[in-house]
Every structure is written in structure tokens, then in C-alpha cells.
Amino acid sequence: MTGYSAPQMPISIRHIAVVAAVASMACGIGGCGTINGYLASGMSDMIPQWAGGLPADAPPRPGTAKYDEFMRERERKRLEPAAAKEEAGQPSSSGLDAVH
């Protein structure tokens, strides 16, 4: 039994074609994932609000001119002084008394 070897199966054209088809599909699916990553960032802005898109008051996307303007306006509002508040000890001018 020392010289025994298992019989070799010949590689057929059909076997090579199946392996090539599976490899081609695997590469195609991987390519779709990268393409969809680019399309999703732009297409999501096109979805209407009623269909689950961005709300009307959502801030603009980073990297756009509107975003830079939005950030400047936000910073300006942050730096302006707060409105004067009434003193805490003074009753409000609503004229309603506490109910006991």
C-alpha cells in the first residue's frame, strides 16, 4: 500500500466556467457597495419629506456654501448678548394669583 495515490479528477471547462461566474458575481456585488455609497449621499436629498426624507428645518450638508453661511449665522447668534431677563423676585405681570 505504499505506492497508492488517490485518483485525480480532471478539471473540466464547466468547472472553470462555474468558478469564473461565481468570482465575477462576487466582484460585481463588491463594486455595487462602493457605487451605492457615492449615490446615497446625493440621492438622500432628493427624497421628499412625506416619504421619509430630511425635514424642512434640517441644517445644510457640510462642504456646501449654504453650510458655511449657516455656521456663520449660528456663531453670530451665539456671540450676541442674551436678552435682559426680569428679576426673579418680582411677580409676573400676568395678574394671576396663586391658588391655595
Image (cartoon, rainbow, N blue to C red):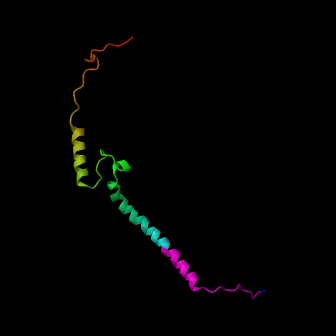
In this view, the residue farthest toward the top is: 100
Residue at 45% across / 71% down in the picture? 28
- In x, y percent, where is residue 18? 55, 78
Q: Is residue 10 above or below residue 73?
A: below
92 and 76: which one is in front? 92
- In x, y percent, where is residue 56? 30, 46
Region in magenta: 2-24
In this view, the residue farthest toward the right is: 1
- In x, y percent, where is residue 58? 31, 46
Residue at 37% across / 12% down in the picture? 99
Q: Is residue 57 above or below residue 25?
A: above
With 74 as the anchor, is 34 left or right in this view? right
Q: Is residue 65 above or below residue 87?
A: below
Residue at 32% across / 55% down in the picture? 46
Q: Is residue 88 above or below residue 64?
A: above
Q: Is residue 20 magenta?
A: yes
Please state, as top left, top right, bottom left or bottom right, where the N terminus lies in the image.
bottom right
- In x, y percent, where is residue 20? 52, 79
Number of numbered tags placed on the structure image: 0
Residue 85 location, quadrant: top left
Q: Is residue 28 magenta?
A: no
Please state, as top left, top right, bottom left or bottom right, where the C terminus lies in the image.
top left
In this view, the residue farthest toward the bottom is: 3
29 and 8: which one is in front? 29
Residue at 58% across / 81% down in the picture? 15
